[in-house]
Image (spheres, rainbow, N blue to C red):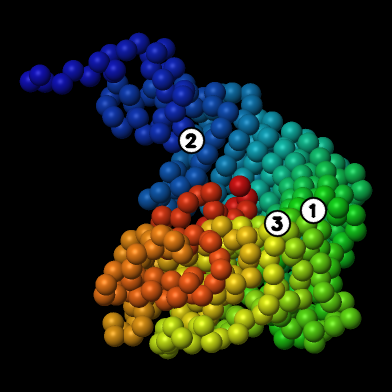
Amino acid sequence: MEKSDDRISKLPDDILHSILSMMPMKFIIRTSILSRRWRNLWKPIWAYATALDLGAEFASGQTPEEFVATVNRYLQLHKGKEVRIFRLPHIPCNPLDAEKWVEFAVAKRVKKLDIDFCKPFKGSKLCKLPNSLFTCDSITHLKLSRCDFSPLLNFKGCPYLKTLHLSDVTVTDALFESMISNCPLMEELILKHCHDLTHIKVSPPDLPLKSLIVEFCWDVDEIEIFAPNLRSFCFSGDFIPMYFKNISSLVDVLLKGICMEDHYIGKDCITVLHHLEHVKILTLFSGSLEYVGLVEEYTPEDLPLRFHNLLELQLVLEWFGWSYLPSIYSFFENCLCPNLMMLFIYFPPIDDPSQSDYQSEELLAEDTPDIVFDNLKVTKMNGFTGLKDEMLLVKFFLENAIGLEHLVLAAPQKAVCDVAKDSALECKSDFASTRILHRNQLKLSESADTSLDRLCERLFILVKASSSDARILICDYSEVNDVLFPRHKYSDFHGLLIPRFT
């Protein structure tokens, strides 16, 4: 055809509106730049849309003043009676604009409200939320960031609120407790970087709370939880006194405790773990793991901890220059996990390249603790590069996990070091290819010319010396099977670790 024929643009408005109504709103609005025919087709769709996401697409390339004008113009075009979702991230910290937009959402009987104010200038206060928000009885999901959370003194609660996310928000103990007491349907609570909050108390016995995340709320010095329906609990920050009561439904826990090398803090950590002995899924970071490693110094009379229900364990080793091997051994010596089936270990980036310079005979001569894992089927090590401590852990599990079926060794996500080529192992961002080692299947090349070949050679020495029938999968980070991901995933391992529950 010499000239293309735009048949879609020739369709009647009703048909085009029907097509547009099945697209995300941000793409619908973009069609206005296609041609004069499409310039105003999106407006009737927007006028009665129930999901308004005024996010990055609206703010891109605009000054704060232009962004405010754009939002005001779009909100004036809306004629519908209801808005289910209203998302407004990174709005300028102007109380008048904020009040106007929140009142718009309240008037539209909003159900899911997400408001993220811009970070205030140094020395200025967080933007205070308008009172109209706390009179809205239609909200089921509320997410607030970078603002002053101050409900009315006569606040009667949000009767249908199920999810509350507060991030970088100022909230007092009294207001927080009032919010919890007056939201009888709350199922999910997330608190991140909250200010002025010193005591987190979740105690209404009938509260259907299922998930609680407390992340880096540095002013908090005590947590009290009475939650019979709680299934998931995540905590990140300084270890503080935590009091649990009636948490029999709790299934999975993540603890990212900051190690302060304090005797009493160590006892707090052990006390918390005693309350959590019944959980099925547990994730511990370096600080928490180190406390457990020193448990004999804190509470020798309380040993051992008994995790009889634990099926999945994840150990995240995030610190540089830390000898993690003794702490891992100590954990399994002091914490009985007879039914553990899946173990995940994240190694930190390499801090001591000299660990790669060792002889295979050293691995065989090194003693490891005699701890039997009766039910461990899968062990996966992320960030594996073949350092001596990593290889000793491989030896440890090959010798003691009598029913081990799969040992997955995944390369680092990114290159973290540059070891000389003449050393025992050349560290790369990924392995040259995927290899599977098995006592009856492996055929080594005649000359180990690549780092992967050298690694396989060392691993095979360990395999031959053990009686394990486990299959060892050595793979690139990107080739790891999704089935072998743990319950707690992470958006950025080397940055701030944020749980994503699957």
Does residue 385 appear to the left or right of 468 in the view shown? left
At mark 1, the secondary structure is loop
Whether 95 is drawn above or below 452: the answer is: above
Q: x%, y% of residue 485?
A: 55, 54
Does residue 341 appear to the left or right of 231 in the view shown? left
Sequence-wise, the earlier of marks 1 and 3 is 1
Q: How many marks?
A: 3
Mark whose residue sits in front, 1 or 3: 3
- The reply to whether residue 421 is in sight is yes
Q: Residues within 10 Å of mark 3 (few under 14, many from 20)?
A: some
Residue at 34%, 64% in the rendered image:
443
Tell me the CA gap for discs 2 and 1. Answer: 47 Å
Q: x%, y% of residue 393?
A: 56, 75
Q: Is there a contact, CB below 8 Å, between mark 2 and mark 3?
A: no
- The reply to whether residue 235 is in sight is no
At mark 2, the secondary structure is helix
Mark whose residue sits in front, 2 or 3: 3
Q: x%, y% of residue 408?
A: 50, 61
Residue at 50%, 66% in the rendered image:
382
Q: Quadrant of the N terminus?
A: top left
Which residue is under mark 2?
73
**Please, what is the three-letter code of the amino acid marked with disc 1?**
Leu
Q: Residues within 10 Å of mark 1 (few under 14, many from 20)?
A: many
The image's mark for residue 212 is: none
Sequence-wise, the earlier of marks 2 and 1 is 2
Whether 164 is drawn above or below 214: the answer is: above
The image's mark for residue 311 is: 3
Which residue is under mark 1?
250
Does residue 375 appear to the left or right of 347 in the view shown? right
